[in-house]
Amino acid sequence: MAGSRTSRKKAPDKKKSGGFMVFVYVLCGVLTVLSILPFLVMLINATRSTAEIQRHAISLIPSTHLLSNFATLTGKSFNPLRGFMNSMIISTGATACAVYFSTLTAYAIVVYTWRLRQPFFTFIMAVLMIPTQLVSIGFYQFMYQIHLTNNFLALILPSIAAPTMVFFMRQFMLQALPLEIVHSARIDGAKEFYTFNHIVIPIMKPAIATQAIFSFVNSWNSLFLPLVLLTRQDKYTMPIMVSLLKGDIYKTEYGSVYVGLTLTVLPLFIVYFLLSKYIIAGVALGGVKG
């Protein structure tokens, strides 16, 4: 009798939990559709003509104007393939510099014990409060004086100073990096850069992958500083070219704009899918440790 009573009491709990899980799955499905829908509309609009887009801005039925839109895009006064390569060079270089030197800075803050360690970290956090636009005029004047305007280095080298990434790397390193490994490597005679490159970097792969995605996306989508520093057409990036398409004084070719946006977004998907396995591995590792 006691067993039957307990089973009767547990039955409603199972129904409630089952209903809650159904609600969670439905909510996740709706959010997934809302996340994918803008990209789907962008891809479909890349196949539609300007008249079709102006008539119906949103459509889920592809059209047949993809090649003509691409021809219009490549027929402008600039070369989108060149812009694609320019964006790739800048984004890859900026991401590599930001990730490596931010991890190296976090390593110096966590592993070494020195008097100004905490004030140094506080100064890095204070830099976060300074907007980029506030120092853009002085930055441009400095780049002009050292003759780095219309030079990709002006957009790559400043990414070495990435306060947000330093903070993230430090927090991850405090939890994931056992200092005993570093001390053991030193006892075995390993140099500091060897220890950092061959021991610390592999441990930091999940954090590096996460920050590499954000850094690449931010650098790829950047418009303000490239628009200020790059004035030659052969140095234009994809966001600059897309913005010029939208600002055509005669007619805005929306189909070619969507083709340009599609070309701009595709590398971001590729980078995410290449690095997502490291993020998932890091999350799984954190769950096992917890």
Image (cartoon, rainbow, N blue to C red):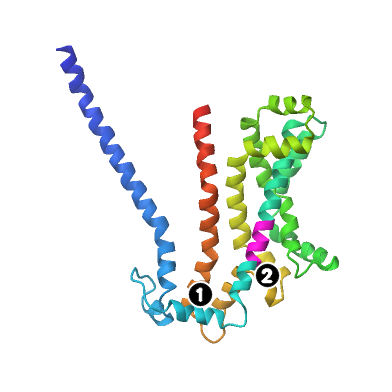
- Check residue 274 for magenta coloring: no
Question: Can you give x and y, in whole percent of width and height, for residue 78 in the image?
Answer: 62, 79
How crowded is the residue under tag 2: few (<14 C-alpha within 10 Å), some, or many (20+)? some
Q: Position of residue 62 (x, y in %)?
A: 36, 72
Which mark is first along the chain, 1 or 2?
Answer: 2
Residue highlighted by disc 1: 257
89 in the magenta segment: yes
**Quick check: 178 above or below 36?**
above
**Circle 2 is placed at which residue position?**
227
Left or right: 187 as drawn, with respect to 278: right
Count of numbered labels shown in the rendering: 2
Locate the N terminus by quadrant.
Answer: top left
Q: Residue at x 73, y 68 (%)?
A: 229
Q: Residue at x 77, y 26 (%)?
A: 188
Label 2 or label 1, whichever lies nearer to me, is 1
Q: Residue furthest top?
A: 2
Q: Is residue 13 above or below residue 163?
A: above
Query: Callout 1: 10 Å neighbours few (<14), some, many (20+)?
Result: many
* Residue 290 is at least partly visible in this image: no
- What residue is shown at x 50% (from left), y 41% (from top)? 280
Identify the image quadrant of residue 133.
bottom right
Amino acid bearing label 2: Leu
Q: Secondary structure at mark 1?
A: helix
Taking depth in this image into account, of 5 and 36 the one nearest to the observer is: 36
Q: Secondary structure at mark 2?
A: helix
Q: Which residues are magenta?
A: 86-93
Q: Amino acid at mark 1?
A: Val
For the view shown, which residue lies furthest in the right direction? Answer: 145
Q: Nearer the viewer, residue 245 or 216?
A: 216
The secondary structure that dominates the magenta segment is helix
